[in-house]
Amino acid sequence: MFDECPRTTHHRLSARQHARVNSDRAENIQRRHELFAGKMWEILQPKMKDPQRLYGTLEREIIYYRDHKKCAVCGADVIWPEAEIHHVDPHSQGGRTSLQNGALVHKHCHPMGQTAMERFAKEWRQRRAAVKAPVPSVEEIALAAEADDNGDV
């Protein structure tokens, strides 16, 4: 159709190659990334998640004895191998892995899904407010654990 001058085609390719090379330089990519990340941080204003997702053995034991070995969902006794600690405020939504945010539940009672977790959190807070049970000290928990190990409970 149209015959292009080889010189024009070569000149056009050189200009494209030159532009691409300049925009792909490491410092340009880094600068664009920093600009983008900064703007996204301003817009989204993210909250940093608690880096610890799981409760450790000590925290699990404290919650286990604090909750008197009772499941926060069904109210039945929980034996240690069936015990799980549920984040009342979900970790995925910024809930901390702390003693105040943990509740003892059976593996099979563990709330799953948004609706179940919201219902659990609401009911758990209502029960906590009604009871206003004091949190046992570390010494009290240690004594309860020792008595449990000795079969005194």
Image (tube, rainbow, N blue to C red):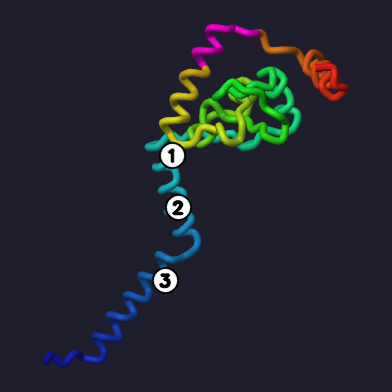
Q: Which residue was labeled with disc 3?
A: 21
Residue 33 is labelled as 2
Q: Amino acid at mark 2?
A: His
Q: Are marks 2 and 3 in contact (CB under 8 Å)?
A: no
Q: Quadrant of the N terminus?
A: bottom left
Q: Position of residue 98 (x, y in %)?
A: 63, 25
Using a 10 Å C-alpha cutoff, classify the residue at mark 3 as few (fewer than 14 neighbours), some (14 to 19) or many (20 or more).
few
Q: Residue at x 79, y 13 (%)?
A: 140
Q: Reply above or below: 132 against 105.
A: above
Q: CA separation, marks 2 and 3? A: 17 Å
Q: Which residues are magenta?
A: 125-133
Q: Is residue 1 left or right of residue 136?
A: left
Q: Residue at x 21, y 91 (%)?
A: 5
Q: Reply above or below: 71 against 84.
A: above
Chief secondary structure of the magenta span? helix
Q: Which residue was labeled with disc 1?
A: 41
Nearer-the-camera pick, 63 or 43: 63
Q: Earlier in the sequence, mark 1 or mark 3?
A: 3
Q: CA separation, marks 1 and 3? A: 29 Å
Q: Residue at x 52, y 27 (%)?
A: 89
Mark 2 against mark 1, which lies toward the viewer? 1
Using a 10 Å C-alpha cutoff, classify the residue at mark 2 as few (fewer than 14 neighbours), some (14 to 19) or many (20 or more).
few
Q: CA separation, marks 2 and 1? A: 12 Å
Q: Earlier in the sequence, mark 2 or mark 3?
A: 3
Q: Amino acid at mark 1?
A: Trp
Nearer-the-camera pick, 109 or 62: 109
Identify the element where label 1 is drawn: helix
